[in-house]
Image: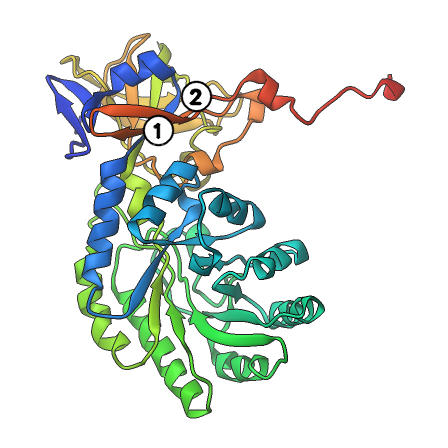
Amino acid sequence: MKFFDSEYFTYNSNELFCEGVSLTAIKEGAGTPAYVYSKKFFADRYTEFEQAFSKVNHKIFYATKANFNLNVMKTFYDLGSGIDVNSGGELYRALKIGADPKRMLLTGVGKTKDEIKLGLEHDVLMIKAESVDEVYFINSIAKEMGKTASAAIRVNPDVDPLTHPYISTGLAENKFGIESARAEEIILECSRLSNVKITGIDIHIGSQITSINPFVESVIKMVELIKRLELKGLKIEHFDMGGGFGITYNDEIPFSPKELADALIPIFMQVDCQILFEPGRFLTGNGGVLLTEVLFTKSNSNKNFVIVDAAMTDLLRPSIYKAYHHVQPVIKNGSKDITADIVGPVCESGDFLAKNREISECKMGDLLAVMSAGAYGMVMASNYNARRRPPEIIVDKNKYYICRARETYEHLLYDEKIIDELH
């Protein structure tokens, strides 16, 4: 089998370490399953992206939906990032880390009245609207509150991002944004509302995109739109091009931030507005692993199974996207390679972490690391089968910190009670 090895997760005397801490030591201290993150990875990826676009007026807003652990969010915020929040809950988390609302974007295709009010109460930098109805709704709420809402309108550029259809968001058939053919007309109409100030336009064409071309095509379209709007007298202050920058899970060869910058900066320079980015997966994805223990192994006439204590409740992506996450042993023991399904304890046939995967032969008690689990892992975890969500651990050099403990059974019942009158 192949082994993924980097400066953040590396084998030392055949044992997998995160920075300077062995994953075996983390298992002994925190149990399994558990999420383990490298702080150095987060900082290095942020710095790489920041430096790549240093020639243009820009701002990074960390996309909280990728990993909303408070300490992960605060790591990026302390480095200078803004925070992109997609719900009232994510906004609340951003406030909990002490984030200035003027460094927040409130996004989301279906925001409620309470969420819009929350954004207006805290004076977030921008509320990003995805339909004409929503802009009018924001205007009416702002009028009730005696405020003027700073808003951006998301445009769907109808560009194929060449990614999984469930995470494609920039085609005309997708639910996101307003259609590009009517964007100029709609934005100008909305700019005349009394309690909304249109300060930006926004795109986000998808996630896990590994080709630069869809971004170039989208940005060219939006720059032309900005020029037309400014000729009509509407100054656009911010152009938010979203995120979606792909990473390596298996054999993908994604572009680097510098390659993206080299392609986009000449286009950005045609307009006078601040460029906003919302990277999430790029900043965290390969900075985390899901640590899991082998419970049992079994074989039938044509199949090997490795049953582990992590499940689809902990990492959902393989079950819903058939997404690839590399799985490798924490201890290299020289055992032979086999082909196996790596499955969890949940009572669903869809509960798997890997199928038909080449892996070193395992035995009960072995530890496995599910790689590239720093994004869209814990944030998508659930309590199905009344399973407790795992802890989250951040490694900083040669120390590790449990920054979110494993849920207790009491956590599962915190808001539930037996009603005597029913029984």
The residue positioned farthest toward the left in the image shown:
13
Between 163 and 406, the one nearer to me in the picture: 406
Q: Amino acid at mark 2?
A: Gly
Residue 172: x and y in percent read 48, 68
Q: Indicate whether 155 appears above or below 164.
A: below
Q: Nearer the viewer, mark 1 or mark 2?
A: 2
On screen, residue 102 versus residue 129, left or right, reads left
Q: Amino acid at mark 1?
A: Lys
Q: Quadrant of residue 284?
A: top left
> Quick check: can you spot residue 303?
no
Secondary element at tag 1? strand
Between 358 and 79, the one nearer to me in the picture: 79
Residue 255: x and y in percent read 20, 56
> Quick check: can you spot residue 159?
yes
Which residue is painted at 24% across and 14% down in the image? 361
- Dot 1 corresponds to which residue? 355
